[in-house]
Amino acid sequence: MDKRIIIGIQRTAKLGRDLQETYPEIAELYADGMSVRQIALKLGLLQEYQQRLDRCARAVSYALHGWGGSKNIPAYSGMMTEEEILAISKEHRTRDYVSSKNRVRVSLAGVIGGGKTPWLKKEDLPREDPRQGELETALSLLRNPAYVHTNTRLFGTPNYRAIAEELHERYPEIPQRTPQAVRVALGKAQGKY
């Protein structure tokens, strides 16, 4: 391992131990729902210790969990037990899931308000409708060789125009998507954007 990386780990582990003594409220802030990054920002650790956010957040994590003892830094216990941290983490995830659902609703309202048409999902269709969601259909068409360029300079690449036309045929209640809109949506769905 690179010596600079080892030194960085040592400094972060030492900082975690120092934070336990200097900021006993870290455990309470974490229990109240703040992430380690939010705690580092709230306490002004970046300015006080002249460190980057990721290093300060890692130090807060060490303060909470403890340090196992390596890299010439002795072990120390965390401010909370692993059971407490797991229970609080589960609460954080549940709260984050609910807030992300609310963000989706607000985002969807913004999309519609901006004159754009959201992609039709399976749950948006009537229960008896056999069709899958619009994006799922587009993904399946993307894997279908019939929707790939075969005789142009774009040979082997997806034919987004043909996919957009097929989507319009299958979902006539939705305004026709442009090839660009289909490309972007499929790229996001595949994690490319």
Image (cartoon, helix red, strand yellow):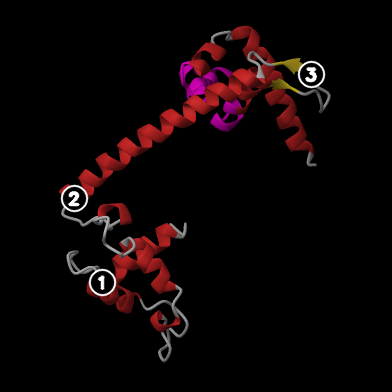
If you read the primary sequence from the N terminus, does the residue marked by circle 2 or circle 3 appear first?
A: 3
Counting other residues with Cα less than 10 Å from the Cα at mark 1, is it few (<14), some (14-19), or many (20 or more)? few
Residue 36 visible within the image: no
Task: Give me the residue at 41% from left, 58% from top.
Answer: 188
- Residue visible at 71% across and 19% down in the picture: 14
Secondary structure of the residue carrying tag 2 is helix
Q: Mark 2 and mark 1: span between their CA atoms? A: 21 Å
Mark 2–mark 3 distance (CA, rounded to whole Å): 54 Å
Closer to the camera in the image, 178 or 135: 135
State which quadrant residue 169 falls in.
bottom left
Residue 73 lies in quadrant: top right
- For label 3, the residue is 75
Of residues 143 and 47, the one drawn nearer to the viewer in this rendering? 143
Label 1 is placed on what type of residue? Arg
In the displayed structure, 114 sits above or below 22; it is below
Quadrant position of the C terminus in the picture = bottom left
Query: Which secondary structure dominates the residues rendered in magenta?
Result: helix
- Residue bearing mark 1: 170
- Residue 107 belongs to the span the image colors magenta: no
What is the span of residues highlighted in magenta in the rendered image? 32-57
Could you say which disc has been placed on residue 112 in the image?
A: 2
* Residue sticking out furthest to the front: 128
The three-letter amino acid code for the residue at tag 2 is Ile
Q: Which of marks 2 and 3 is in front?
A: 2
Circle 3: residue type: Ala
The reply to whether discs 1 and 3 touch (Cβ–Cβ < 8 Å) is: no
